[in-house]
Amino acid sequence: MNTIPKASIGNNERHAGIDVGKSMLDVYIYETDLHWQAENTSEGIKALVRRLKRYKLTRVLVEATGGYERAIAEACSDADLPILVITPLRIRQFAKAEGILAKTDKIDARLIALFGVKMQPEVRALPSRKTRLFKDLVSRKRQLKEARTQELNRLQKAQPHVQPSHRRLLKFLDKEIDWVNVHLKKEIARIEQWQHTYELLVSAPGIGDGVAFTLIAELPELGRLSHRKIAALCGLAPFNKDSGQMKGKRRIRGGRAPIRTVLYMAMMSAIQHNPVMRDMFQRLVANGKHKKVALTACMRKMVTILNAMVRDDQEWSMA
């Protein structure tokens, strides 16, 4: 099977799939077999949102495409349309499961709409505009730090006559990182809840600004979910891999990679300076766990502790 099945009739729900391109948006409403295109510009998006509101849609689904989907997603959210941003991996896996091999912009839009029809994903409100802007700053800091690490590595291998160029760029990157940090702290200070959460988080030994900023931006669910769900969102929940008599190794996967990255770096410090994490790490290693497995377990323990601290409105305590 390499085509998408025809639209069902008699269903009260309506699902719109939007295939996002750099310049064009392909829109397909599954239940009515209606397809059209719109320009991916501010004016084109405004007209598209006005048209979508006529159809009393159950879900509007767009595939994440590295940022090109952001404008239409935010416009739909601002217009109170039931927007969902779906990761490309889920759409590709769904296409394989359905046996859909053909690919055009129209087929992709129809596929995205069909995903909504069959999978019935839960509609959740997008983060607020302030949260999105704060997340942009956190993302920019991450990009700058990655660039700084790359340039520092180049400096170590550079010949003496080009080293001044590397040093100048490093100095510039340091200034940009400082600029982002200043703006992050200003944004934190403007929202009382964020400031309070920040103070709770940094009270834990080994948790600095980088982790606190990332958790506030990338994990707004902190303090509102169970420890298992929080660990899963961070990509720190181990998954079984068993079949019959075979018992495979449990491995972590998925989740929000930026959180996992900063927690890893924080844990490298915490196992040195945080007595609770240090004792746990040493105990696991002494019991035969690989150091990386022990470190991951400590990361999972730390995020569940931070989740409880925010939930219970309590700073770090050794008790």
Image: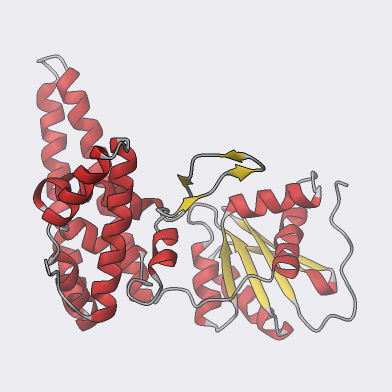
Q: Where, quadrant-wise, is the C terminus in this rendering?
A: bottom left
Say which of 304 and 207 sits in front.
Answer: 304
In this rendering, is residue 2 above or below 37?
above
User: Residue 194: percent from the left, percent from the top?
Assistant: 23, 76
In this rendering, is residue 155 above or below 173?
above
In this rendering, is residue 285 above or below 211?
above
User: Residue 83: percent from the left, percent from the top?
Assistant: 58, 73
Say which of 163 and 248 sits in front.
Answer: 248
Q: How many marks?
A: 0
Q: Residue at x 76, y 56 (%)?
A: 106
Q: Residue at x 55, y 57 (%)?
A: 64
Visible in this render: residue 176? no
Left or right: 109 with respect to 228?
right
User: Residue 232: percent from the left, percent from the top?
Assistant: 44, 59
Say which of 310 and 199 sits in front.
Answer: 310
Q: How is the image coloured?
A: secondary structure
